[in-house]
Image (spheres, rainbow, N blue to C red):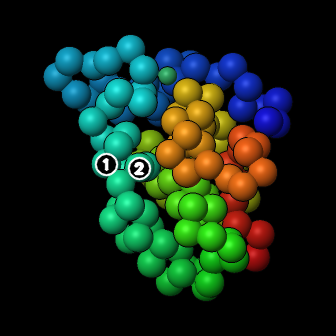
Amino acid sequence: MPSEIENICCKEIQKVVKRMKQVPDPSTCMVHHPGFEANCLNPYTLQNIHNIYRADYGPLRRRTEEERNHYLAYRSFVSWCWGYLGRNVRVVIPSCDVSRIHQQFPEPAGQIDGFRPPVN
Ligand SMILES: [Zn+2]
């Protein structure tokens, strides 16, 4: 787990807090926001994110569907909270959200990785 994503709480990131406050009864953690499941865990959303990715960057090189979803869930989280980011802009995803995505779409090696923008 890269040090940049360790112990970063969702409440420490302004863009994430902004999203959290948009619901009537904000919860204490972003993983409980109704939009989290819809944007990051829903397989049909990720299917759409995959199409958008392919239109922008071409084929996504990931071996399994789970690996693909893992990666696309991070991308979806970022575009949901931050909007469009340039190719070289990196952001820190709160560790609670990284863990929840990892729990849903574990990678074969069992490691938790940080968000990496496409290298192309
Ligand atoms: Zn949290």
- Horizontal arrangement in the rendering, residue 85 relative to residue 79 (left or right): right
**Mark 2 burial class by Cα count in 10 Å: few <14, some 14-19, many 20+:** many
Q: Residue at x 42, y 20 (%)?
A: 29
Q: Nearer the viewer, residue 83 or 60?
A: 60
- Horizontal arrangement in the rendering, residue 86 relative to residue 30 (left or right): right
Label 2: which residue?
Answer: 41
- Horizontal arrangement in the rendering, residue 86 relative to residue 48 (left or right): right
**Residue 92 position in % (x across, y down):** 66, 37
Q: Nearer the viewer, residue 21 or 98?
A: 98
Task: Tell me if residue 61 comes above or below residue 9 in the rendering.
Answer: below
Secondary structure under the numbered disc 1 in the rendered image: helix
Task: Tell me if residue 50 comes above or below residue 42 in the rendering.
Answer: below
Q: Residue at x 42, y 63 (%)?
A: 46
Q: Is mark 1 within 8 Å of ligand 1?
A: no
Q: Residue at x 77, y 69 (%)?
A: 119
**Residue 13 position in % (x across, y down):** 55, 26
Q: Quadrant of the N terminus?
A: top right
* Cα–Cα span, label 1 and label 2: 6 Å
Q: Callout 2, which amino acid?
A: Leu
Q: Callout 1, which amino acid?
A: Ala
Q: What is the total number of numbered labels drawn onto the structure image? A: 2
Residues marked 1 and 2 touching at CB (< 8 Å):
yes
**Residue 28 position in % (x across, y down):** 38, 14
The dot on residue 71 is none
**Mark 1 burial class by Cα count in 10 Å: few <14, some 14-19, many 20+:** some
Inspect this view and state whether residue 113 appears: no
**Residue 40 position in % (x across, y down):** 43, 49
Q: Quadrant of the C terminus?
A: bottom right
The dot on residue 38 is 1
Secondary structure under the numbered disc 2 in the rendered image: helix
Q: Residue at x 65, y 42 (%)?
A: 91
Task: Tell me if residue 45 comes above or below residue 61 in the rendering.
Answer: above
